Image (tube, grey):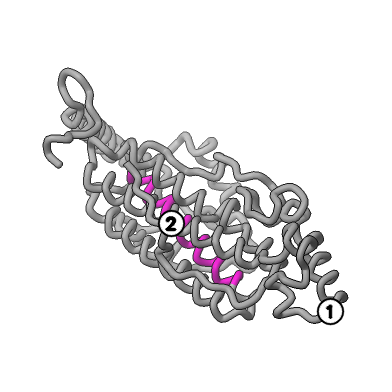
Amino acid sequence: MFHHSKDLQFNARVSKPDPVFANILLEQFGGENGELAAAMQYFTQAFGAKLPHPDKYDMLMDIATEEFSHLEIVGATIQMLLKGVNGELKDAADQSEIMQVLDGKAAKESIIHAALSANPQFPIITGGGPTLRNSQGIPWCASYIHSNGDLTVDLRSNLASESRAKLVYEHLMKFTDDPYVKETLSFLMTREVAHYKMFEAALETIQPNFPPGVLQADPRFTQQYFNLSPEKSVRGPWNQGDMPGMDKEWDYVGDPISQVKETEGLTVMDTDMEAQLEKTEQLNLALSKQKSEEVKAADPSGTAQWSDYDAQ
């Protein structure tokens, strides 16, 4: 059950109309890295987490709901940036608020032109309101959502989503000189950082959480770094020394072509891999059983009921 408060989470303000920036800001309304995408991603991920991870279900729903509130903040800001751009500008130009910051007919025509060139949908199709499209007018699409049914995978997707959204807000702040709008964007950007740390902390509470999913990595192919761009090759912690958290060392393959030929396409390997393969298979069986039991144990017997109203 959602309860809507008409007060915004953050007091969004705008000092003057700016239809061009309003169009740019649509990226965070109906764009790939915007607030609706984040809200729907966490909202859909929460369903699969409800039974095996009820604590993560609570977190995902809380953050999804906050993202909806951020969508409202972005939409409200866009609407305020479009003051005077809709029919009110033409019908009552002298009384419209936009004339308080712009002087004369030339300025009025300029702002109308700016609105039309920024996004014709604003004044023509939507009547001056934001729609779920990005700054190029492309409709929001469910393919923006990453929900894979494995919570460790989903949480890693969320870390990436929050990182991208933060970067978009950083870029957006470069294109406005309105101090109020910058203040709003700074708040939204900072909440991306907060959500990132929430997801990071939640991931750490799920053990084991590597590799993603259930099955272990094949030990025959885990350690190799193939030097596939041999000119001016670079060595670093990603191809030499210890593999992070793996208790193994990187195997740097300096000449991948020769190595593939010698191993007949990586099919002829050292015999000491037999023991590691057997151990990996045992881990696969054990972890598969553990994950399956977690979900089965969480399923209620008898009639399924999502909410326990007596416990409220």
Vertical arrangement, residue 210 with respect to residue 84, above or below: above
Q: Nearer the viewer, residue 259 or 243?
A: 243
Counting other residues with Cα less than 10 Å from the Cα at mark 2, is it few (<14), some (14-19), or many (20 or more)?
A: many
- Give the residue type that dot 1 points to: Gly
Secondary structure at badge 1 equals helix
Q: Position of residue 19 (x, y in %)?
A: 71, 66
Name the amino acid, label 2: Ser
Q: Position of residue 1 (x, y in %)?
A: 32, 41
The stretch of residues the image draws in magenta is: 151-172
Q: Is residue 165 magenta?
A: yes
Q: CA distance from mark 1 to mark 2?
A: 38 Å
Mark 1 residue crowding within 10 angstroms, few (<14) / some (14–19) / many (20+): few
Q: Residue at x 49, y 54 (%)?
A: 225
The residue that mark 1 highlights is: 104
- 12 left or right of 247 in image: right
Q: Position of residue 183 (x, y in %)?
A: 50, 76
